Each structure stands twice: as structure tokens, then as C-alpha cells.
Amino acid sequence: MLPIKKIYVDSRHKTVDSESDINFKYELAVSLHMPQNACFYITDVCIPHVWRTINKDFNDKIYFGVSANVGFLVGAVALNDWIRIIEP
């Protein structure tokens, strides 16, 4: 069993080729090699309050994507896009 580890990502430390503060890349200090079938969870997210009041069916969605290199295909990327509704 692997020990529980946390990775803290802060957009202030994004790479120079990042598109913006909300669409950014982050480079880990060390490479992490996980065994097959390893599970990962996002446990905390801090999003600054920079939008207007949330209105149902108008601006109540948050969009994010997760991508990773697929080990057995060189250069291939697996991408999952997610949409979640923010309860007003």
C-alpha cells in the first residue's frame, strides 16, 4: 500500500508556456510513478470569488479537464472533461 500523499498546485507557480491564470500547466518537482490501478482524488479546491452571483441555469456550471500521459503510448494523452453544477 502506498502512503497517502498530497500535491498542492498553485496557479502562481504555473509554467511559462501556460495560457493564463485559469488555463495553466504545473510542473511537479519530482516524477511520480504510480502502480497500475492506482486511484487519485481531488480533496480540496480553493477558487477565489471572482465571479458574479450564481444564478440557476445561467452561470451555475464549472468546467474542468484532467489529462495525463498514457504510459504505453508515447506522447498520447488521455483527457476527461467534467462539468459540475454549483448550487446557488
Image (cartoon, grey):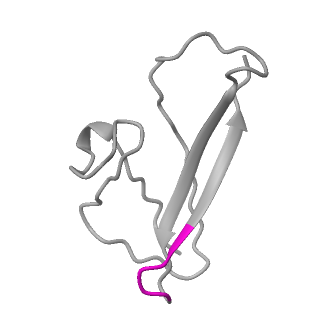
> Going 70% across and 24% down the picture, which residue do you hit?
60
71 or 40, which is in the foreground? 71
In the figure, is residue 44 to the left or right of 80? left
Residue placed furthest toward the top:
53
Q: Is residue 3 magenta?
A: no
* Residue for point 46% across, 66% down: 3
Relative to 65, is 4 above or below? below
Magenta-colored span: 73-78
In the visual, does 31 lie left or right of 46? left
| Residue at 68% in and 42% down | 83
Residue 17 lies, with reference to residue 3, above or below; the image says above
Point out residue 27 in the picture as x, y percentages from the top left corner: 28, 58
Q: How many numbered markers are drawn?
A: 0
Residue 77 painted magenta: yes
Residue shown at 72%/14% (left/top)? 55
Residue situated furthest left in the rendering: 16
- Residue 57 lies in what quarter of the image? top right
Q: Where is residue 36 in the image (x, y as percent from the top left)?
A: 56, 82
Judge whether 22 appears above or below 36 on screen: above
For the stretch drawn in magenta, the main secondary structure is: loop
Quarter of the image that includes the C terminus: top right
Q: Which of 34 and 53 is in front in this view?
A: 53
Most distant residue in the bottom direction: 72
Q: x and y percent of residue 75 in the render?
A: 41, 80
